[in-house]
Structure formats: structure tokens, C-alpha cells
């Protein structure tokens, strides 16, 4: 059971970290994120987000990935 | 002949391993998507000659992008796979490895960036990794060549462990198991490079860094270009080549058609290398002394930015702005390439996912991004009249880029996909690789541009001789003089712009133009129509119908912009 702090990547603050719990999107989105290792169960840390609905940069498996705002909005993370 | 495929994620040094194996010089970059048009070469395996193919970087064999689609198709045709794995990020790389092992093709793993991994405190137990995967695993450091010999020796030992196909979750679970067994990461403090990395994708610090990087890039390009012209090429042409031209001119009688074609028009015993328009005068001076210096400095700086890994960060920063134009941040890469030459820029639009994006990006590049050759001439000729005029030319092109982008975004049906890219760590690129790539690009310029420049100058002389330009000038005078406020002779330059824009701008030099007229002419020349090389690539990339649409946008945009400039300046 997920408990407590469920937020989307865009709601996370830079510096916060947690675990990806789900991706709210179609197969296309899930496939593309899967290719970059963004999958449920992975630890994820937010590095930054650009102003004006810009992309979110995260660190996952020691690699950095930049994710467009709309996509980031659909990635749900349970905060530590 | 057997085919060996190099398969791996983007940014793991696959192309460097490729050039180590084959000795063929290929372009190696730090951003994903660079090898979407693949390269092939040959390797001697004992007595046998085998073909080596550098497959476009891919994260998965369940294709999600065009590049991955191509990678999958190429995999069907290969005999052996060298799977290049990133030792600093095994988790990510192994997903593709597991998929490869599920297929019936022998695999050998090159564990690249081995030194980098150790510096970052990542320890990999090679024996256990070999056991878990069931194939040879060879640690390599591609940029120094370490491990390449062992890799070649192990190609014949490549095997297919014949794992049955797994589900996605099963694969990730297997990877988790392997990682627990073979990898130990020592905790370590952030290095200054990593701090800089994080700072360059944050809004405030990232913005400051971007401005600093772009301004210094511009200053360095100008400094190197100007120095090469002022201290090397101008003296060479003026002191060594001019006397040769003058004696040749005497030898040929000082005038006549053949004389003008070969050495150009000589006035008062002096060679004007820009205005004379002979094959041996302007034909050599324009490409070598005006354009080449900027090509050298531009590609040196661009290559550094690419190989350091700065460009994906610029894509993140520019994402919001690029969305206004119906693109996403990644489109900044073809745009920057366009400042060197529009041909590779249009080709690089392939890294964008949709047809719509590729149409918008390549149309915008062709219209509003002047290539280095044209820019060199703008600096040379317009800059002579004062720096403010150069600013007006660039400012106009930039405004046109934004406005046209917004218009195209609303006119072209479809939506703009979102940015999703890996951001590679900053790396200090080895000079050998930076210089190699720069040389490849300079050679490409020389091989492509020199024949067209000489051909254009020959054609111009012939057309003048037969009075063809007079006819064209009469015919188009209403538009050129009426709308753009240019003398009717300027049309000749606009027509020649289809061949080479640098030569075309050079043709304006002898005309008695005011500074404003020169500004209008430069802008219209930049926007009106792509040069023939870009045209051919656009035709191939967009198809006939879209090329016509794109050309329609270009011509109307150029005439409207030129007309407005003529009115307000």
C-alpha cells in the first residue's frame, strides 16, 4: 500500500528524492520512459525544474534525464 | 562477408570504439542521436575481413524512436554483436544487453568508460558479470584505446547463451539481481564538475551559464577567425598571391573574356580579391581567406561544446522557448549546427520525432539561420559599414525566426511532442578527438564548397558575357527596386544565392549600395531560398510537396521582411 506523500515530479521540489510508484499514461509514454530507466520501483531524485512549465531534470541510477513538463506531471513519486 | 554490429545506448563511446576497430574516422559526439545515419568500416579478424557497422544508439529493442527502429532493422542483418555497455551506468545499459541475449545472435560485451567508473567509485566484479551474462565481457577505455586488442581477440568467442524471452518486469528484476551481485558503489562527495552539472540545468544559474557560454563561444569564434584572416591569410594573398595574379594578368594581355574568367577584372594595377571575380582571384580568396577561417573557428568551438556535453543542457534551458515555435528544446541542436552549415543542420532534424517538427525546424533553419560562409561575408562586407548594421541583420533574422516559428506552429497541423533526453555527464574531451572531428568537417566544407564556388564564378562570367543577367534584371525590376529598394543589378546576386550565398554576397561588393541597401540585400539573400546543397537535402528530407510549401514560406517571408526593412530603415 502506498502511503503518505504521493506527488508528481512537477510537484516535487529540487533536492527531494523518493521512489517512482506509477506512470499515468499510455503505452507510448510508459515505453519511452522505460527505455530511459524511469520505471516504477526506481529511486529518483529531482535536480531542477525550469520556470514557465519547462522540463524537469532528475537523477535515476546515477544518470540524469530531462523530462518535459507534461510527461513529468504524469510520473508519480512517493517521497522519502 | 560477416557483419559485426556495434550496439549500445547513446553516449557510451560506441563511435569511438568503432573508429578504433576500423581506423575509419567518424564523427563522435556527446549527444544522443548523432549516429542516426550509421557508419560502416572494415576489420581484419586473422585472415578474415569483416564488415563493422556502427548501429545508431538505442536504449531498447522495443523501438520508441526512429533511430531505435533503424537499430532493430539492422540487427536482423548482423552475424555478431559487440554490445557496448556503459560501466558507469550498468543498470541502464543491461536492459539492452538482456534483450540482445534473448536473441539468437552471438554477443560480446565491451564494458566501456571503465576508467570513468573507477574514478566515480563504481566497482564491477568482471568474473561475476561474465558468469551472469554468459558471454565474454571485456573492459575498455575507448578514448585511449585500452582493451581494444582484447576485444578484437574475443570477437570469435562471442556466444549466444540462448536465454528465453522475458517480460519487461522480469528483465528489470534480473538486472536488479545482477547489480546486487557484481556492483559495489563507494560513497563519495560531489565533485566540482558535478556541481557545475547541476547548476547548468537550474533556471537562474543555468541561464547565467548559458549566456556566458554562448557569449564566450561567439568571442572565441570571432577572435580565431579574425586572427587567421588578419595575420595569416590576408598577408599570404596580398604579398604572395597578388604578384602572381598580376604577372598572369600581364601575360594574358590585361583584358578580354578569358582573362576576366581566369584572373578577373584588374583595376589600376591592383588586385581586389573580393570584387574582381576571376577563378584564381575571388574564386580562391572567398573560400580560403574569407570563409575558411570562420569555418575552422566555428567547428572548433562547436565540437568542444558537443564533446563536453553542454548541448543537451542548452536543450533543457531552451525548451520553453522552443515550444512557442512548435518544437522542443532538442531542436536547438540542428539550429546551432545551421550556424555552421545548413546541410548537416537539416540532416540533424532527424533527431526530432515527428514530421511536423522536422518540417518546422528545417524550414526555420533554411530561412533564418545563416551559415558560417554567409556570416563571414556579412561580417566582412556589412561590418565594413559599421557594427550596428551587422546587429540589424542578425536582429532581423532572429525576430523572423521567432515570428515564423509561432506562425508555423499555428498553421501546421499536429502537436509538439515533449522533451525526453538523457543528459550525459560533463567530460573533458581528448584533443585528438576534437581535432579529428573538426578536420572532418573542414574537409567536408572544402570538398563541397570549392567546386561550387568555382563553378558559380565561371557561370557568372559566362552569363554576364551573354547578357543573360540583363534580361533577368529587367524582368524582376519591379520587385527588386520597387519592393526592396535595391538597384536592379542586385537581382543577379539574389539569383546566384541559389548556388553559394557567400559568392552571392560578394557580388554585391562592387555595387554602389548604401549601408541600408546592403542590410536589406543581406537579409533577403539569407532568407529567400536555400543554396543548392541545402535545397537537395531539404528535398530528400521533406519530399517534393513539403519542399514546395517550405519554399513558399521562404520566398514570402523574405519579400515581406525585406519590404518592411526597406520601409522602416
Image (spheres, rainbow, N blue to C red):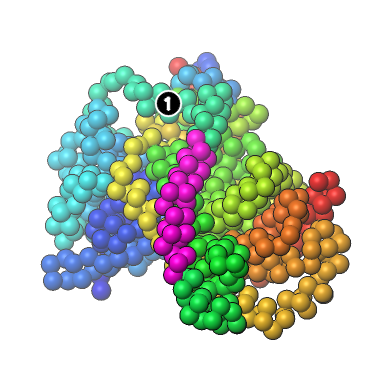
In the depicted structure, whether residue A80 falls above or below residue B524 = above
User: How many residues crowd around disc 1 within 10 Å: few (fewer than 14), some, or many (20 or more)?
Assistant: some
Judged from the image, the secondary structure of the residue bearing numbered disc 1 is: helix
In the depicted structure, whether residue B203 falls above or below residue B534 = above
Which percent across, then down, holds residue B72?
Answer: 41, 59
The structure residue drawn at horizontal position 73% and vertical position 59%, both measured from the top left corner, is B512
In the depicted structure, whether residue B270 falls above or below residue B172 = below
Q: Between B287 and B86, which is closer to the camera in this rendering?
A: B287
Would residue B188 be found to the left or right of residue A60 on screen?
left
Q: Which residues are magenta?
A: B216-244
Residue located beneath label 1 in the image: B196
The structure residue drawn at horizontal position 62% and vertical position 27%, both measured from the top left corner, is A51
Which percent across, then down, holds residue B354?
Answer: 60, 54
Which percent across, then down, holds residue A5?
Answer: 53, 17
Would residue B158 be found to the left or right of residue B358 on screen?
left
Secondary structure mostly seen in the magenta stretch: helix
Residue B116 painted magenta: no
Please tell me how many numbered marks the rendered image carries.
Answer: 1
Query: To which quarter of the image does residue B541 belong?
Result: bottom right
Amino acid at each position: 500500500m502506498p502511503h503518505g506523500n504521493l506527488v508528481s515530479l512537477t510537484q516535487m521540489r529540487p533536492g527531494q528524492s523518493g521512489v517512482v510508484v506509477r506512470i499515468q499514461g499510455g503505452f507510448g509514454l510508459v515505453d519511452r520512459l522505460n527505455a530511459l530507466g524511469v520505471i516504477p520501483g526506481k529511486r529518483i531524485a529531482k535536480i531542477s525544474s525550469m520556470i514557465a512549465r519547462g522540463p524537469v531534470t532528475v537523477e535515476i541510477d546515477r544518470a540524469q534525464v530531462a523530462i518535459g513538463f507534461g510527461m513529468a506531471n504524469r510520473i508519480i513519486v512517493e517521497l522519502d | 562477408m560477416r557483419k559485426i554490429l556495434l550496439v549500445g545506448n547513446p553516449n557510451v563511446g560506441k563511435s569511438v570504439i568503432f573508429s578504433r576497430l576500423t581506423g575509419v574516422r567518424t564523427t563522435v559526439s556527446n549527444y544522443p542521436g548523432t549516429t542516426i545515419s550509421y557508419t560502416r568500416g572494415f576489420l581484419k579478424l586473422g585472415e578474415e575481413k569483416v564488415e563493422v557497422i556502427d548501429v545508431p544508439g538505442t536504449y531498447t529493442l522495443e523501438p520508441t524512436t526512429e533511430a531505435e527502429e533503424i537499430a532493430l532493422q539492422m540487427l536482423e542483418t548482423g552475424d555478431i554483436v559487440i554490445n557496448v555497455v556503459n560501466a558507469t551506468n550498468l543498470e541502464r545499459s543491461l536492459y539492452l544487453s538482456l534483450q540482445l541475449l534473448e536473441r539468437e545472435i552471438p554477443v560480446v560485451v565491451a564494458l566501456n568508460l571503465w576508467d570513468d567508473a573507477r574514478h566515480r567509485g563504481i566497482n564491477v566484479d568482471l568474473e561475476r558479470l561474465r558468469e551472469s551474462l554468459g558471454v565474454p565481457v571485456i573492459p575498455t577505455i575507448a578514448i585511449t584505446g585500452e582493451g581494444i586488442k582484447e576485444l578484437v581477440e574475443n570477437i570469435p568467442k562471442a556466444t549466444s547463451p540462448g536465454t528465453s524471452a522475458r517480460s519487461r518486469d522480469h528483465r528489470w528484476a534480473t538486472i536488479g539481481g545482477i547489480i546486487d551481485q557484481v556492483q559495489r558503489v563507494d560513497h563519495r562527495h560531489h565533485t566540482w564538475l558535478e556541481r557545475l552539472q547541476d547548476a547548468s540545468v537550474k533556471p537562474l544559474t543555468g541561464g547565467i551559464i548559458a549566456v556566458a557560454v554562448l557569449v564566450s563561444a561567439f568571442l572565441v569564434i570571432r577572435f580565431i577567425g579574425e586572427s587567421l584572416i588578419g595575420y595569416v591569410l590576408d598577408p599570404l594573398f596580398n604579398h604572395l598571391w597578388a604578384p602572381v595574379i598580376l604577372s598572369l594578368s600581364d601575360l594574358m594581355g590585361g583584358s578580354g573574356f578569358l582573362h576576366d574568367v581566369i584572373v578577373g577584372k584588374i583595376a589600376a594595377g591592383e588586385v581586389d580579391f573580393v570584387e574582381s571575380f576571376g577563378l584564381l582571384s575571388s574564386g580562391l580568396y572567398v573560400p580560403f581567406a574569407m570563409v575558411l577561417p570562420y569555418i575552422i573557428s566555428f567547428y572548433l568551438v562547436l565540437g568542444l561544446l558537443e564533446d563536453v556535453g553542454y548541448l543537451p543542457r542548452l536543450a533543457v534551458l531552451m525548451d520553453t522557448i522552443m515550444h512557442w515555435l512548435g518544437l522542443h528544446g532538442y531542436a536547438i541542436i540542428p539550429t546551432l549546427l545551421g550556424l555552421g552549415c545548413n546541410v548537416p543542420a537539416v540532416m540533424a532534424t532527424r533527431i526530432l520525432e515527428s514530421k511536423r517538427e522536422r518540417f518546422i525546424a528545417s524550414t526555420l533553419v533554411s530561412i533564418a539561420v545563416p551559415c558560417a560562409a554567409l556570416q563571414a561575408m556579412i561580417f566582412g562586407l556589412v561590418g565594413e559599414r559599421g557594427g550596428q548594421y551587422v546587429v540589424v541583420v542578425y536582429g532581423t533574422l532572429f525576430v523572423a525566426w521567432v515570428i515564423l516559428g509561432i506562425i508555423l506552429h499555428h498553421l501546421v497541423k499536429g502537436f509538439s511532442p515533449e522533451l525526453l533526453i538523457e543528459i550525459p555527464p560533463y567530460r573533458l574531451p581528448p584533443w585528438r578527438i576534437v581535432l579529428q572531428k573538426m578536420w572532418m568537417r573542414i574537409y567536408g566544407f572544402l570538398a563541397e564548397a570549392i567546386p561550387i564556388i568555382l563553378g558559380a564564378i565561371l557561370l557568372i562570367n559566362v552569363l554576364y558575357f551573354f547578357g543573360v543577367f540583363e534580361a533577368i534584371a529587367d524582368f524582376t525590376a519591379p520587385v527588386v527596386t520597387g519592393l526592396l529598394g535595391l538597384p536592379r543589378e542586385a537581382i543577379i546576386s539574389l539569383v546566384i544565392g541559389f548556388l553559394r550565398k557567400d559568392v552571392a554576397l560578394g557580388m554585391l561588393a562592387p555595387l554602389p549600395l548604401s549601408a541600408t541597401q546592403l542590410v536589406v540585400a543581406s537579409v533577403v539573400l539569407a532568407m529567400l531560398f536555400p543554396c543548392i546543397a541545402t535545397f537537395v537535402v531539404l528535398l530528400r528530407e521533406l519530399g517534393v510537396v513539403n519542399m514546395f510549401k517550405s519554399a513558399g514560406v521562404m520566398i514570402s517571408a523574405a519579400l515581406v521582411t525585406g519590404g518592411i526593412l526597406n520601409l522602416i530603415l
